[in-house]
Image (cartoon, rainbow, N blue to C red):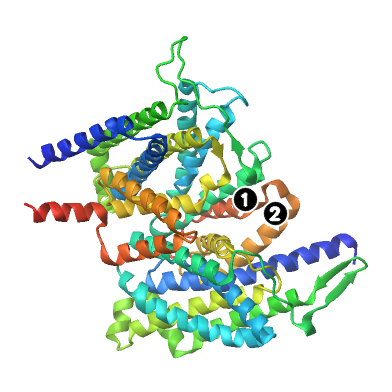
Amino acid sequence: MSDGLAFFLIQVLNGVQEGLLLFLVASGLTLVFGIMGIINLAHGSFYMLGAYLVYALASFTGDLWTAILIGVPVAIVLGLALETLLIRPLYGRDHLYQVLLTYGLILVLEEIRSLLFGDDVHGVAVPAFLDFSIPLKDALTYPAYRLFLSALCLAIAGAMWWLIRYTRLGMAIRAGSTNREMVQSLGIDIAWVYRAVFALGVALAALAGMIAAPAASVFPGMGNDVLIVSFVVVVIGGIGSIKGAFLGALLVGLADTFGQIYVPQLSGMTIYVLMAAVLLWRPAGLFGRAGVG
Amino acid sequence: MRATRERAVLLAAFALLALFPLLAGTFYLQLFAKIMIMAIFAMSLDLLVGYTGLVSFGHAAFFGIGAYALFVLSPQYAAASLYLSLPVAIGAAAVTAAVIGLLVLRTSGVSFIMVTLAFAQMLFYYVIGSKTLGGSDGGYVYVKPSTTLFGWTPVSLDHPAGFYYLVLAALAATYLVLRFVTRSLFGHALLGIRSNESRMRALGFATTGYKLAAFVIAGAIAGLAGYLDAAQFGFVSPDLFGWRLSGEVLMMVILGGMGTLYGSVLGAFALVLLQDGLTDVTRHWLLPLGLFIILAVLLLPRGLGGLLRRAEKAHG
């Protein structure tokens, strides 16, 4: 393998890893919109919350896995509570009020984070058995944790596909995204489906933040960056489409990674140019259905 | 009867704002100038949100363009001419709005919200990456624009009252222009698009053209607000394009009550004064602000303007 090829391979791995992680966040965003008709600006804050939660729990328990095992149920409970208190009154209201309320929620969550953890940048240790690098070429190596991260994200994506394709909840989700009234008249409790979908979205975003924490740092405002990039993913993939979110996330991950190498002065812009191109070609996104507002 | 009363209230409010410099010190003049700049910005967004039904979450993009236009046009230690730099700033914001509008108007509803945010973010990253624009550090406008025309200086903007009156004039002009626009045939077409776009299309209106025109007008006025902001604070930074400012101005419009123009002015006053009061009390002022917004959405479905209208009805 030549140096150039090894370098290229590393970048592809980085791009795919970034994309898969984004998928975990974006899939929740697109589900919550597709099923419940709610646009949730605070979705990125759950990612941040996950990262801070695992930072706090890992420094307490000393182990990443225990921290995640405790953290995910906490995120689910938070999701259920928020759905009941804040999101439920928004069903059927104009998107405007959803934007406004969830914007307020961003501010509240960000300040709670600031009160509890301060405004410093933190790190979470990589678990010992994954704390090594795989040599690709004399000077080029790839960290094992990142590879593990990609595999874990793929496994979660697979589990989601199974959940939506083969379980009762999945059936209700698919049916609910097509025809809400029909689902209700068939005797499925749509309120329960909504609660489950919202909690699932919160848990996925928080989990993404948790497993990303050892690979990156934990810092204030990290949720907002992820939120906006997730929007790009959802717009590219088509709103409400999980398949679209998957493809969109990979495209965005790769475009961002290669943009940083080939056009470093415009690196922040690559994904938005990609989005503009997709919009020109297919205004409803790659897998968007016509008429989905 | 109702219309004349509304006009009387607005004229009285304008008179109070015009007399304000006689009573207030520099601090309050600057605070009120800042509020009026945000009010101009919020009214421009109201044209989109309240009248056309386009919820833009990236309106700060045009505010930023206006501000950076003054930064680019100002010689380092000398003043830019108001008569040259202001039209250029407004024009630059309008052209940017036309280009972005052509793209974002291909979407609607919730995609429109996300896509407008994404385009503002794109400009944000462009400015951060650009060395000539000062990158993430931003830059200074050391000298306020000069109003000198053929050797005659009508008002010095360095004087707080002088700047205050420039902003007040811009506020009044913005209100009158937008009032004219929204009450014209064009404005009624926008309202028609807001309530049912396919019906308007069936009636033979080229709705995309109307929406684009509204987007450009709103962008141009946002550019005016950004220009004034840069002139007031003498500082520009990429945050002027940021989503937080886009969110703030959207809050002003919604909390004030959409589709009324003066509601946006109320929203700007309420929010900036609230922010100002809270920052004095606590470093974590965003927490009470966020709670306030959440409660307002849950408890005040029609904004502060709606509250006023209800109070008015109760009093007959």
Residue A67 in picture, x, y percent from top left: 63, 84
Q: Is residue B80 visible?
A: yes
Answer with mark 2 or mark 1, whichever residue precedes in sequence: 2
User: Which dot marks residue A269?
Assistant: 1
Extreme residue toward the top, this view: B150
Judging from the image, mark 1 belongs to the subunit labelled: A
Residue B130 in picture, x, y percent from top left: 66, 41
- Element at badge 2? helix
**Both on one chain, marks 2 and 1?**
yes
> On the rendered structure, is A57 left or right of B63?
right
Residue tagged 2: A259
Residue A188 in picture, x, y percent from top left: 33, 87
Q: Residues within 10 Å of mark 2 (few under 14, many from 20)?
A: some
Residue A85 in picture, x, y percent from top left: 35, 76
Q: Is residue B212 visible?
A: no
- Element at badge 1? helix
Q: Which residue is painted at 54% across and 51% down in the image?
A: B121
Q: Which residue is painted at 51% across and 41% down in the image?
A: B64
Amino acid type of the residue that numbered disc 1 sits on in the rendered structure: Met
Judging from the image, mark 2 belongs to the subunit labelled: A
Amino acid type of the residue that numbered disc 2 sits on in the rendered structure: Gly
Most foreground residue, A140 or B155: B155
